[in-house]
Amino acid sequence: MHPEADMHPEGGRFDSCHPHVTDTDQLIAALRARAPRLALLLAGAQVAWPIASKLRRRYQVQACYTVKVPGNDEIYDDLHEWVLGLMTLREQRALVAWTGRRGFDEFADEFPPDRRAAEPELRLRYDGARVQAFTVAGHPIKVHVRDDSDEGRDSTRARPPEIVFTAQSLAGRQALLAEIAGVLQRSRQASRPATFRMLDRRGSWTRLDSLAPRDLASVILSPGQLERLTADVARFLDSEPEYLRKCIPWHRGHLYEGPPGTGKTSVARAIASHFGMDVWYLPLADVKADGELLRVASQIDPRSMLLLEDVDVFHSATARDDHTAGITLSGLLNALDGIATPHGLLTVMTTNAPDVLDDAVVRPGRVDLIEHFGHADEAQVRRLLTRWYGTEVPGTTGITGVAHADVIEACKRHETPSGAIADLAARVPEPLWVTGA
Ligand SMILES: Nc1ncnc2c1ncn2[C@@H]1O[C@H](COP(=O)(O)OP(=O)(O)OP(=O)(O)O)[C@@H](O)[C@H]1O
Ligand SMILES: [Mg+2]
């Protein structure tokens, strides 16, 4: 995280109440005859008071120090919980209860309901609309949340919300920064499941942390394929010292190619779950320019997976003509294997059409391993059915050469393996459907 510290005009929020003088004019008039000096003094004070208040306010504004943490920062939610923990229950007046599914709908198609966590954890934060006060090591601190996302702005231009802390002194700000560093350290030490992030339309990474992890055993591939892939990733993750010694950038690229519904995305997620790597899903079509691509790629944490789906459909990956809108081939290549590529990055690209990819994209260093995902053969169909229904499917199904996704869909529609087999047989044209085989 990068807390941004600066002088902030909103320091004026620290204003205390002004004493309210009533009927001063009457008092001055009454005193004028009996105590002219006192009346004169009061009249002078009446004129000087607003000027003094203004000066005091200006001084307070300049004497305030703020620390802002943007809403897309990894520590944002933990900071909210920390602040809440500093308040008494009575002070916690405006709470927001949430489940960490922000932005989930944008990605719902890719991850259907059966793969979401059944019971997301309930988390609390305060709504941030009202300024809250607390102390850190004896220093008064105020906090509020600045959020302009609901103000009818164009969603692509709205900034993410920010939690804004204001200290009255430099010492207060330093104490606050030390506490924030502590929150960050505790959050990093806490064992947490791998998270899933997606680039939203504002160009910020959004964390979708209630997606269920994908078990490696749930992905059915040809014999040895999963072992080959996991061994490659394990070797890569273990090889950081070797890369550092040889002064070569520590990153690796996988390309998964094959027909739709054969497990490319599923394998990527299962590998990430298995190795505890965060997944960063970057829809290339939503990235407006090369600079933005580099910026968002450089924000990816070390030891993460960058998932680029269906790379063949993006112009930048298939053609060298740089005149169209959006990112260019060189921008994509720089992000995959350039100066801003994060340390320990595993890039996984998927495609249904590997032949149209530019050679420069799949050259070693950008793509180190190309893995073909084929249709399920008879043995795989049987394993899929066995896993779904929880019972061994005896004999042969006679179904081969189908997409794994089609088998899963047939299972969803039928209560028994025989129902699913009949369904698949009716859909799959000969010779893929081998009668009596
Ligand atoms: N090899 C597999 N083993 C188990 N389930 C699979 C497999 N392949 C696909 N599925 C199931 O089919 C659905 C779609 O799979 P997935 O998204 O991984 O396919 P894909 O190869 O990425 O397809 P596309 O090329 O269309 O992106 C998922 O629900 C997944 O559970
Ligand atoms: Mg896919």
Image (cartoon, rainbow, N blue to C red):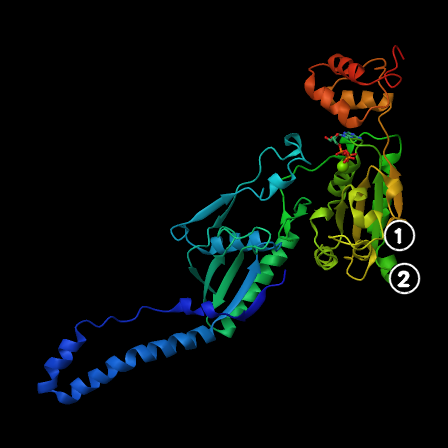
Q: What percent of the width, then of the height, locates residue 173?
A: 52, 69
Q: Which numbered mark, 1 or 2, is in the foreground of this view?
A: 1
Tell me the amino acid under the disc marked 2: Lys
Q: Are marks 1 and 2 in contact (CB under 8 Å)?
A: no
Q: Identity of the amino acid at label 1?
A: Ala
Indicate which disc, 1 or 2, sits on the residue closer to the N terminus. 2
Q: Considering depth in this image, is 152 or 384 the residue closer to the camera?
A: 152
The answer to which of 259 and 223 lies nearer the viewer is 259
Q: Residue at x 75, y 15 (%)?
A: 423
Q: Is residue 103 visible?
A: yes
Using the rendered view, name the quadrant where residue 298 is placed: bottom right
Ligand 1 rendered quadrant: top right
In the picture as drawn, the residue positioned furthest to the bottom comes out as 37
Q: Which residue is mark 1?
A: 360
Q: Quadrant of the N terminus?
A: bottom right
Quarter occupied by the C terminus: top right
Mark 1 residue element: loop
Gap in Å between the C-alphas at discs 1 and 2? Answer: 24 Å
| Image vertical order of residue 161 relative to residue 376, above or below | below
**The residue carrying mark 2 has its beta carbon less than 8 Å from ligand 2:** no
Q: Quadrant of residue 409?
A: top right
Residue visible at 45% across and 69% down in the picture:
11
Q: Which residue is mark 2?
A: 246
The answer to whether residue 320 is left or right of residue 27 is right
- Image coords of residue 87 (percent x, y): 44, 55
